[in-house]
Image (cartoon, grey):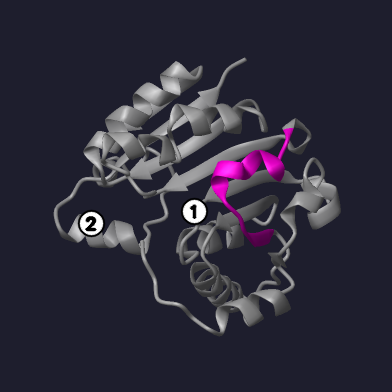
Amino acid sequence: MRIRFKPWARPELEASKFYIDNPEEYKGNWTEKAFKNNNKLHIELGCGKGQFISNLAVNNPEINYIAIDLVDAMLGLAKRNIEKVYNDNKKDINNILITRYDIERILNIFDKNDEIERIYINFCNPWPRGKHHKKRLTHTRQLEKYRGFLKNQGEIYFKTDDDALFLDSLSYLKQTGFNIEKYTNDLANEPSFWNNIITEHEKMFMGEGIKIKAVIAKKEE
């Protein structure tokens, strides 16, 4: 998703107490060094405007969350959305961090000592052209990296509007040793599938009659 440059984003991020500008320094010790506790750790890859992660985190204070995106403008909007959601719920922002990083280099900021229990990937770029498939966040090349820091029995929660990406992703997961716990081709009509947080994109796609596909996959040794 493209977004216009926002000159205020970088200064606001640098001034924020829950923005991390140097994530490499926390590799292997996020819970104790960054969050200063021993709570479970979940991450979202490609957090966009932060609607999903802000609502998830505010309702699960016992879990630490890290949201990652590559674009300052997106993270700036995510910061503001997080602040609004926590303020509306009259809660302090103490279980969520956001950082700017290239997910293709994710092994520079996480390792097995982080014992991440869950990865969320929502509506990532489908990269439909064959020569670009390796850029997909669910491609085998990326999934192998996630295995390097996702704890055993850790999970990937993935949803998309794109049929081809979804089918390919199911194959990618199986190829890299993930067990498909369950999947659906119509998330809206399976309310018990998971405790879904409907994002801005999701509402748009559903309004156009596009079915949302979702999968839960578990890492197996």
Disc on the earlier residue, 1 or 2? 1
The range drawn in magenta is 96-111
Q: Is residue 29 left or right of residue 101?
A: right
Q: Which residue is mark 1?
A: 46
Separation (CA) of disc 1 from disc 2: 18 Å
Does the residue at mark 1 contact the one at mark 2 (Cβ under 8 Å)? no
Residue shown at 75%/50% (left/top)? 24
Q: Nearer the viewer, residue 55 or 156?
A: 156
Residue shown at 46%/45% (left/top)? 121
Q: Is residue 188 left or right of residue 79?
A: left
Q: Which residue is mark 2?
A: 205
Q: Secondary structure at mark 1?
A: loop
Residue shown at 23%/38% (left/top)? 163
Q: Residue furthest front?
A: 131
Q: Nearer the viewer, mark 1 or mark 2?
A: 1
Residue 102 shows up from this direction: yes
